[in-house]
Image: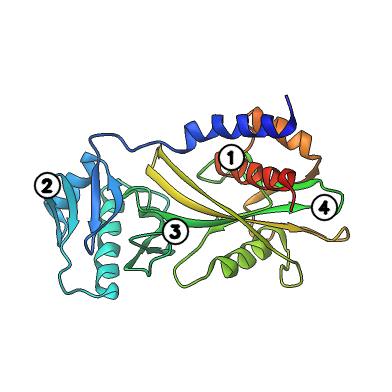
Amino acid sequence: MSDALRLHSLRARLLVRAQQAPPRDWLPVVIAGAEVGVASPEVASFLASGTPHFTLTDFRLLLLDDGLDAGRRSALLHDCALRLRDAGLLCGWRDEPLDVRPAPDAAPIATVERAACRTLGITTTAVHLNAFTPAGDLIVARRAEHKQIDPGLWDNLVGGMVPAGESEEEALRREAQEEAGLDLAPIALVRGSRVHATRRVPEGFQSEIVQVFDAVLPEETELRNQDGEVAAIERRPVAAVVEAIERDEFTLESALVTIDALLRRAAGP
């Protein structure tokens, strides 16, 4: 089997896990007339029965926001997140607002606490960096064991959410500094594909769009985690990374991000 065929086959296998529809009995979450998420019957019933401005209509969970601006919607969603937390329906409060958009490139219509996004199935945006050496090896990072999601698995060198008010490039540069002590300002970035993962997760439903970036780091680059969320950083040959992905040693998102870069490199200019 050729390397490209192997990568295509591996990506197809991973996409079976990464692109799933929500359970049939889950309800669309509608804000400002747009379906922005999906909620379990338990969450939908809880919000509709005891949270101001939420109602169930035509098998949809609606935020009644006629005439409200983005700031007021954000306040209502913050109250919603607090109620879900206090009811034990979400965990891992981050105190980090993320944008709520009716479509990936549309203007935000509200913000919401990050911890509530999977409980409400709201689509989030993330950035990941494939870091290559001049020789073509990959530099990868192992997630700390205390991470709530995918502890101990291997990951791209840099990856993280895009918070409200930041561009993708700004988020990538900030995450690079926090996770690897890496200043991306002098380094050329290549924008790759967008990977959209949709799947049931313990917190609810994940809908995450990952913007892929690639970079070749100078040989003398020194890398050191700054925020305590990375347990190790290693340089590995591409073949070893692919084998580790086949053994499910990488997070699902990072595996797809890595394969995206490898297929683009194999295709050439």
Q: In the rendered image of this protein, does residue 126 appear above or below residue 261?
A: below
Q: CA distance from mark 3 to mark 1?
A: 21 Å
Dot 1, how many residues are within 10 Å of its Cα: few (below 14), some (14-19), or many (20+)? many
Q: Residue 120, percent across and down? A: 31, 50
Report which residue position mark 2 lands on: 58
Task: Name which of mark 1 and mark 2 comes first in the sequence.
Answer: 2
Q: Residue 182, percent across and down? A: 73, 64
Task: Name which of mark 4 and mark 1 comes first in the sequence.
Answer: 4
Q: CA distance from mark 1 to mark 2?
A: 37 Å
Dot 4, how many residues are within 10 Å of its Cα: few (below 14), some (14-19), or many (20+)? some
**84 or 19, which is in the foreground?**
19
Report which residue position mark 3 lands on: 94
Q: Are marks 3 and 1 in contact (CB under 8 Å)?
A: no
181 on left or right of 110: right
Report which residue position mark 1 lands on: 251
Q: CA distance from mark 3 to mark 2?
A: 33 Å
Q: Residue 72, percent across and down? A: 24, 73
52 on left or right of 113: left
Task: Name which of mark 3 and mark 1 comes first in the sequence.
Answer: 3
Task: Name which of mark 4 and mark 3 comes first in the sequence.
Answer: 3
Q: Residue at (64%, 33%) from the top-left corner?
A: 249
Dot 3, how many residues are within 10 Å of its Cα: few (below 14), some (14-19), or many (20+)? few
Report which residue position mark 4 lands on: 133
Q: Quadrant of the N terminus?
A: top right
- Count of numbered labels shown in the rendering: 4
**What colour scheme does the image use?**
rainbow
Task: Name which of mark 2 and mark 4 comes first in the sequence.
Answer: 2
